[in-house]
Image (spheres, coloured by chain):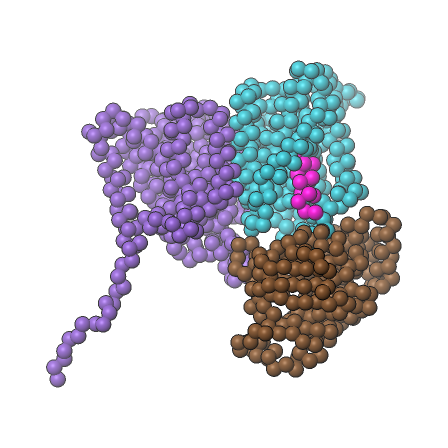
Amino acid sequence: MVEVAREPETSIEPPRPKSRRSRVVAGVVLLLLLVLLPLSRPVVGPTFHYLMQMATIALMWVTLATSWNLIGGYAGYISLGNNVFFGVGGYLAAALLVYQGWSPFLTAPLAGLVGLVLGLIVGLITLRTRGPAFIIATVALLLMAALVFDNWELVGGANGLSLPLPGYPREWARVPFYAGMALTALGSTWLSWKVAHSKLGLGLRALAQDETKAEVLGIDTRRYKIVAYALSAVFPAVAGAIWGYSLTYVRPSVFFTISIAAQMVLMAIIGGRGTVAGPVVGAILLVTVNEVSVARFGSSELNIVVTGIILIIVLLFFPLGIVGSLRQRRKLPAFLDWD
Amino acid sequence: MIQTLILGVLLGGVYALMASGLTLLFGVMRIVNLAHGAFMVVAAYIAFFLFTELGVDPFVSLVVTMPTMFLIGVVVYRTLFPRLEGSDRYSEMTVLLTFGLALIIEGILGYVFTGIFRSTNPSYNTDAFLIGDLFIPKGQLYGSVASLVLILALWLFLNHTKTGYAITALTQNRTAAQIVGVNVLRTSTISFGIGMALAGAAGSLLSYLFTFFPGQHWQWIALLLSLIVLGGLGSLAGAVVGSLLLAVLAAFVSQWLGSTWSPLTFYLALFAILLVRPQGLFGEKEAV
Amino acid sequence: MFLRVTDVVAGYRSGPDILNGLSLDIEEGRTYCIIGPNGAGKSTLLKVIAGILAPRQGSIRFRDEEVGGLRPDELLARGICFVPQDPSLFPKMTVRQNLVMGAFLEKDKNVVKERTEEIFEQFPLLAERANQAAGTLSGGQQQILLMGRALMIRPRLMMVDEPSLGLAPQAADQVFETIAGLNGRGITVLLVEQSVERGLNVSDWAFVLDLGRKVFEGPATEILADPRIGELYMGKAPTIE
């Protein structure tokens, strides 16, 4: 018998939906941008330094916001003190540099690890309660850290530590920090994406909706919460290590302020709490707005007034944030839909 | 030793006043008011203004600060909070909302008054009663007594007036209160106003007991929040007991380790209570 | 018509419609039982009439006045009271204080006192525990207290949501005895009860709900024999009347 090969009726693999494709394209474009930016020096000339600095800052905030999102967005537990880990990472790397001579670029991963462990310990204690008490505990944590570091002689107290300059050639001085921060931001966003698409993410969303029901369904809410919190500490710590180095000094006022905590939360909320792309959008947006307003109006107390007003307006009228609201109205462009 | 104890108790009385407003807000409306400290500082500035411009004694200023803050509270509550009603995550939303409020208040105060440390300085601030070996600062004593009177007045109000019952009912069971005809919106508004009035009173006292500046409210709110978690969120008795206990403890810590570390007492106590009894001294298991 | 519900649509927060155009009529002085499978909207209906949930569409007329969307305290003033399913006592208040709270809207203190004594007379069980904290009472006692509290305002229409839920049979018996006596006091009763037999036993008329609508109704004594009931509870598609 001759077997006649037949074309299958339908192709086995369904055609790639347009959204998937555009998401991949978006990802590639972003990566290209990140890689090409430092190479733009001949094109942008003297503003290169400023551009690198801005990009580094933006990427730092992307890291902070996306990491915060793990506990504040997915799990719905608002932490007003996540920058504690930011500071701990910064100080750890700084101390190791000053006392041991190790480059923060090498110790940054260690900082991340320390962040994880610290997050676990803190989480174990503070996540014994629900919403309101947890938030209060995080505020206390932040102020406690500020107090401790302000008075700790080993790390310079209120004056902090001065870090030696890395000695990079002047023209490219900012690039290593940019690169480090870019990697950190990528890592943080990747983690956020990974968690969102995992069993952990599902469980977190369930307990964010209704913790009692989630428990009744058999979800180990305590474990999930603690894991989310610990994970949310990793990349901020790494970012702290790099940031401190890039500033060439670490001081309590660099890391342990309520203002930083407020910004982190605000970025995630404006962008869209609980979505993957939200904090990224929010961070970039706010950094830009901040820059513009400081350039125009100068920095003053009115800055925090504006932050407060924006926070309240977003909370009352756009609680889902930009990405969240767009998604709800089914108007979310595919390249932003990373969930 | 007794000296330290007395100083602690006197201070604790004032903390209790501050914490009582905060815990009332949570108990009745599940609001975590991160701006409570900021409102206290606003009242302190009012008292300061009255003192320096018109020579009004801080205690007399209570007559101004309390009603003013009550009204501000009513306006703030009605404008901002009803929109959040019915949300599953009401408490968390109030945290963010009041966070924003605190930032706004701090910014405005800083802009108007700048960051200079201020304080009112009535005569009794530096005087003291001497009983045997014990040195009882007049200012602290008066402040503590005033606090006690106000807390007592609050307690009487809650237990002997119709509105007070309504407030107590709301604290215990919101649905039940609705069903028996309590006007939830009106009662909540009044409660918020009362909470703010208490903050106003605290601010008047604060103006001479401590130096203050716009950014200081974060230390206050962290301390007060720790206190109410310790006492049990929503419990007036808890706020009073917790304040007295911790103030005394902090006084001893201050004595032994220096005053820089005394705030740490409150934070550590908070973490300790979370470990041992997360619902606080007088709190109920599932309330949080 | 004492109470007329017309084409009411309602749901929770921004969720889907639970009531999908529900209509029914209630005459004064009788006891009505609402039955139906889970999710039919029975409790939701009571909550809408009680003012705890506002209707999205439709009308609710009580003694010729449109009351849809009014607040619970406004409805109480008109004599509509609600005894919900969740324990809605004030746990830290005493039995007496809970009763007093029941007459919250009553301004005259003497009237409140009188009524409290009346309730204690009718329910010796409550009188015995007058100064006990409500939270310490047993399930059955709490239900009786809930009803006593509802009676404080001398309601015209009392709505009771699943009174026997979680109660031991004896306690449930006591509760239903009380319900049976309400008509004699001039109170119209609207009852939601999962335990169909018990509910129908104390009622004159029954409404059968499914998927947010009334699918049929009839005298309480006859409804159990209606074959459509079996279909409804066993899952066959009901015909809408």
Which residue is at 52% across, 38% downward? A312
Is C104 left, or right, of B31 in this rendering? right
> What hue does chain B carry in this figure?
cyan
Viewer-side residue, A81 vs C206: C206
Query: Mostly what secondary structure, the magenta segment?
Result: helix
In the rendering, at what x and y percent does residue B268 appear?
A: 58, 38
Q: Residue furthest bottom?
A: A1
Viewer-side residue, C82 vs A6: C82
Question: Visible in this render: residue C59?
Answer: yes
Which residue is at 84% across, 56% downward? C116
Which residue is at 77% across, 50% downward? C104
In the rendering, at what x and y percent does residue A42 appear?
A: 19, 29
Residue numbers of the magenta segment? B183-196
In the rendering, at what x and y percent does residue A221 appear?
A: 51, 55
Residue B188 shown in magenta: yes
Q: Is residue C129 above or below residue A265?
A: below
Chain letter, brown in picture = C
Viewer-side residue, B74 vs B132: B74
In the rendering, at what x and y percent does residue A50 appear?
A: 30, 27
Is C38 left, or right, of B4 in this rendering? left
Q: Is residue A309 above or below residue C95?
A: above
Question: Which quarter of the rendered picture does the N terminus of chain A lie within?
Answer: bottom left
> What hue does chain A carry in this figure?
purple
Query: Splitting the image into 4 quarters, where does residue A287 fall?
Result: top left
Which residue is at 24% across, 42% downward? A32
Q: Residue furthest left?
A: A2
Residue B125 shown in magenta: no
